[in-house]
Amino acid sequence: MRVSSYAVARPIYYDRNSATKGKTYQASAVAPHTTTTRWTYTVPTGKAAYVEALNAMIYRDVAPTVVSLAQVIIYIVSSDAVTSTVLQVRTYTSATYTFFYGSQSNIALLKAGDQIYANTFDNSTGGSVTYTVDLKLTEFDA
């Protein structure tokens, strides 16, 4: 197609074969654990993705015997292998029925090969935590 004028623009991203994608991890009464990846998303070849929303929640179900850090971290790894933390929710309390919540919107534009993933960990001894970690994005033709 020959473009004879700069007034002719490429369609906006959501008009380029777009699809809504999401990832979620929800689990109750999770025992202390080392760093564990809960979900991951990699942008396919020929596509790009706009990360629209991230949510993370930690809820202390049962008090630990020895309290330590429990957290959720969401990372983006770009195609040049640079890792960035985009959302982090943490708690360092033994108080039960307490929750900690974090949310972000309009996060990032990811290119083919870029990755976003969520990790959880709880270094406490005993006790348990409920986790919720969500991602919403729009994938479209690059």
Image (cartoon, helix red, strand yellow):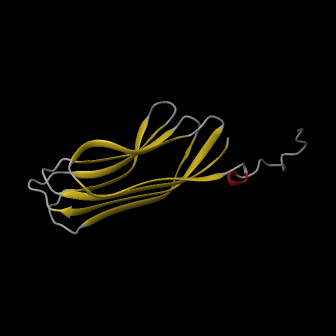
Quick check: 26 left or right of 52?
left
Quick check: 53 left or right of 63?
right
Where on the picture, by quarter, is residue 59? bottom left
Q: Which residue lies furthest to the left in this view?
A: 65
Q: Give the residue at x 91% y 42%.
A: 4
Q: Give the residue at x 37% y 60%.
A: 102
Please name whichever residue, 32 or 43, is drawn nearer the observer in this view of the structure: 32
Please name whichever residue, 124 or 100, is drawn nearer the observer in this view of the structure: 124
Q: Residue furthest top?
A: 80
Q: Give the residue at x 68% y 54%.
A: 14
In the picture, the quarter occupied by the N terminus is top right
In the picture, the quarter occupied by the C terminus is top right
Where on the picture, by quarter, is residue 100? bottom left
Quick check: 107 left or right of 46?
left
Question: Vertically, is 12 above or below 97?
Answer: above
Q: x, y percentage for residue 133? A: 39, 55
Q: x, y percentage for residue 111? A: 58, 39
Q: x, y percentage for residue 98? A: 23, 67
Quick check: 20 left or right of 129?
right
Q: Which residue lies furthest to the bottom in this view?
A: 97
Please name whichever residue, 133 or 73, is drawn nearer the observer in this view of the structure: 133
Label count reads: 0
Q: x, y percentage for residue 125? A: 12, 50
Q: Give the residue at x 61% y 42%.
A: 48
